[in-house]
Every structure is written in C-alpha cells, then in structure tokens.
Image (tube, coloured by chain):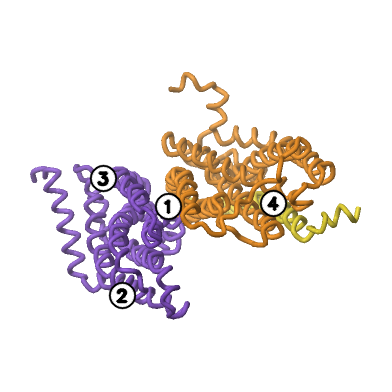
Chain colours: A orange, B yellow, C purple
Amino acid sequence: MSKWIPLWLHKLGSPPTFYRFAGTLRPWLLALALIAGAVALYGGLVLAPADYQQGDAYRIIFIHVPSAWMGLFIYGVLAVASFVALVWRIKLAESVAMESAPIGAAFTFITLVTGSLWGKPMWGTWWTWDARLTSELVLLFLYLGVIGLYHAFEDRRQGARAAAFLAIIGIINVPIVHFSVNWWNTLHQGSTIRILGPSKISASMLWPLLTMMVATKFYYVASLFGRVRADLLDLEGGKEWVRRIAGGDDAPNRQAPGERA
Amino acid sequence: MSAFLAMGGYAAYVWPAYAVFFLVLLADFLSPLLRRRRNLRELRARLARQTARQQRPASPTVHP
Amino acid sequence: MSRASVSSACAAVLRRDLTLAWRRRGDIAMPVLYALIVATLFPFALGPEESLLQRIAGGVVLVTVLLAMLLALDAMFRSDIEDGSLEQLVLAPQPLALMLAMKILAHWLTTALPLIVIAPLLAGMLHLPVAVMGVLLLALLLATPMLSLLGAVLVALTAGTRRSGMLLALMLLPLCVPVVIFAAGAVAAAQQGLPWVAPIAWLGAALAMALVLAPLACATALRIALDA
C-alpha cells in the first residue's frame, strides 16, 4: 500500500513536519482568502446591480451560499479524515477531523442566520421549514454532536476515534435527511417556501459568488492549519520538538522517555 | 455612499448578515491563536518547574 | 468449559437480560408513566379542542414514545459496563454483533413494547381517529426498533464517558429525523386519506438495513470506546 504514497506525503504525516509546513503556508492562505474575499465583496456589494425582484436584499447571497457550501464541504472533509483516522490510526488525520468540526459548525451557523435574515424581508418570516434550511439545521446538530462527543472523553485520542465514527454515521444520514425532508414538505403542503436565489443569476452576480466560494475555501484551510498546529502542540506536549518551540534555553538535559524524532 | 449603506431599504437585514459572517469567522480565527498562546504558556511553566526540580539538591527517592 | 454454540449463546444473553429487567420491573413502568404524563401535557398546553388535538395526535404520540425511549436508552449497557460483564462479552469467542443484537432485542422488548401497548391509550386521549390507529401501531412497530438499534450504536460510543443524557439526545435526534418524518408522515397521510403505504415501506426497508448494520456498527463502536 505504501508504494503509491509519495514520500513527501508520508513525511507530512509526522507532526513536527506538518507543523512547519502548515506554519509556512498559513499566512499565504490567509492573504489569498482576504484578497479574494475583498474582490468578491466589491463585486457583490458595489459592482453587481440590484435584483429585479429582491432589490438589494439579495446581496446576502454572497455570504449565504458560500457558507452553505462550506458547511457541507467541510463535513465531507471531516468524514474522509475520520475514515482515514479510524482505518489507519494516523494522529494527524484525527487532528484534521476534529479541528474541522468547529469551522464547519461556524459556517453552518452563518448559513442559518443569514438565511433567516434573507427570508424575513423576502417572505415575511424569520424561519421556514424548506428542505435546504431544515437540512442545514440538522447538519448543525450533527456537527455539535461530533464536537460534544469528542470533548466527552478524557483520553483525547479515544475521543477523536469515537467522534470520527459518529461523523461517518452522520454523513450517511445527511442525504437521507434531505430526502426525507423533501418528502415531508410535499406531504404537508402549507407554507413550503423555498429560499431561492435571485430571479436570474446574471454573470455580474455569479462571479462574485464564485470568488467568495474560493475565498472561503482558502480561509478554511488557513483556519484548519492554525487549529491543527495548536492541537499538535497540545497532543505532543511532552515531545522534544515541542519543547524546543516552547523555549529551547530551558529544555532539560536528559531525553524524555519514549522520545522519537 | 448613503445609498450604498441603505441597501435599497434592506439595510437592517443585509448589514447584520454581513456582520455575523465577519464576527463568527473572526472568532474562529482568534480561537486557535488564543489556544496556542495558552498552550505555550503552560508548556513553558511546566518546563520551568522541571528544570527547577532538577537543579534542586537531588533527594534520594524522588525522580521527576 | 466447552465453547457454547452461537445460538445457545444468543439465547443465554437474551434470557439473562430479560431476567435482569424482570427483577427491576419497576423500571419498566417508568418510560410508560413518563409517556403518559408528557402526552397529557399537550392538552394542558394547547387546550382541549378536539379538532386541534386530532391533528397533532399522531405526531405527539410518536415524539413522546421517542423521548421515553431516549430516557431508557442510557441504561442499555450501563450496568454491564459497571460490573465488567460487557468487556467479557467483547472478549468472548461468539460474534459480538450477534450478542449485542440480543441485548438490543431484550431492551426493545422491555422498553418499547410496553410503550406500544399504551400507545392506543395515548392516541385516544388526543382524539386520534380510530381508523388511523392501526397505521400508528404499524409505524411504531417499525420505528421503535430503529430507535433501539440506532440508539444502541450511540450508547456504545459513549460507553467510556461521563455519561450525559443530553449528549446522547444531541447525537441521536438528528439521526432520528428521517424516522420521525416517515413514521409520523404515514399517520398524517392516513388521517388525510392519502396513501400511507409508501412511507411505511421506506421505514420497513430502513429497518431491514438497520437490523443488519446496526449490531455490526454497535460492535465497532464498543471496541472503539472500550479500547483505551
């Protein structure tokens, strides 16, 4: 199995190597996120014209849709990292999975709040039980469950494995929930309001949207790197490389037991 | 400029939405920084305690 | 000691859990009383008007049964973890998934079955039309095992933790949303005179899959949670 994995990928799985790698990349990723975000916001808030039907309120789309997409995308990353963590027991995969969860929950929360703020002026209601918003709410609960389970264990690695298992069960649930909520909406015909985009998405509205999606993706990776680095310091606190970072001048003379490079 | 801020009358909805976006992501950005600072502080304190223990005259039974 | 055959091991586990539950038969009444009380809260909260209660009866009974089962779920493995017999089960040569399936069956028999028995009473108090009662019972017969099976996986995951009932609820309820939608939806459809077989069929299919997959997932979850 190891033959097709390049050496640099193997090395990246080692905590100190990843720590350095992530630390170098992070400022660049943040810069890219900020630049892309600024461009997208300028395009969306200033350049794009007002929508025919929704006026200026549609501009919430530029943060609502990218956040919704990130909420789902990050859960996908969480599930894949969880799978890797459970099957191959790679410490870094556990860290990536567990540290992705709060970021995904944040984006899902933003999706729900901005969706609500968009719905109120457009359809007169703060909340609607349409398929997409309801699925986002369930997704938020899934995230919170994973985060809660992770923190319920005293042994962090065991907690990560349990939460990883829950994440995989959860991702099987996401399409099932979407399907069942769709059916539910058709059964209870009533106020089945769908929060749609503007009447027609013109090019001037599309490119800021796509740019913002790119910006949020860069931000996610940057934030993830920051969180995983902090997590690695925590996990590897006893190791030599962490001690060197903390302040090498007062590192003890002897090697700590079980020391590995 | 004021037309921009007014957002066609929907300012009460658009600007809070953008505010939530930025504030939540800012909180997400700051959280690992604070955690890292706390970790390093605790780590340094622990290292200082360990070196202090070693520099004390060694007692016959205790070993860190 | 000779190695027991799988079927006799299954029977032994089932018999043991049922006996233990029977010795604490007071505990069997708890979820039932809880469901009764919660169901009576709804008329107090919403008013006794029959047409309103009739509309919500199916959903209220289902959610009430779900919450009552959630309360009882925590106890599925707890006493076995505390006295170490669960670890013995994990180490035993018999397939763990089958043994756990027997435990889940025992738990369902002692927790869900009493609830299903009183469900007509609850539904009647909320003025559910008698014609729909059969669909409600069928929906409960399919939904409650799913809750037991899904719940067992999650209870196994939290086996080593300082157990918090709230955490279990937080983890379980999102997974239960499709079950609730289809079960209550079947009752609502029947009440409106619409075809109700489709959601029941979906429930049945999901239950069939869960019967196979959940004990395996439960065994994996248990190994993750107990393996320090």
Work out how far the residue at label 3 is from the one at label 1, CA to CA, in angstroms. Answer: 24 Å
Instruction: Give the quarter of the figure containing the C terminus of chain A.
Output: top right
Chain of the residue under label 2:
C
Question: Quadrant of the rendered structure where residue C48 is?
Answer: bottom left
* Secondary element at tag 2: helix
Identify the amino acid type marked 2. Leu
Could you confirm whether marks 1 and 4 are on the same chain?
no
Chain of the residue under label 4:
B
Identify the amino acid type marked 3. Ala
Identify the amino acid type marked 1. Pro
Identify the amino acid type marked 4. Leu
Work out how far the residue at label 3 is from the one at label 4, CA to CA, in angstroms. Answer: 44 Å
Q: How busy is the neighbourhood of tag 3: few (under 14 within 10 Å), some, or many (20 plus)?
A: some
* Secondary element at tag 1: helix
The residue that label 4 is drawn on is B30
Work out how far the residue at label 1 is from the one at label 4, CA to CA, in angstroms. Answer: 37 Å
Name the residue rendered at 54%, 21% in the picture.
Answer: A6
The residue that label 3 is drawn on is C97
Question: Quadrant of the rendered structure where residue A31 is?
Answer: top right
Work out how far the residue at label 2 is from the one at label 1, CA to CA, in angstroms. Answer: 26 Å
Q: How busy is the neighbourhood of tag 4: few (under 14 within 10 Å), some, or many (20 plus)?
A: some
Residue C178 image label: 1
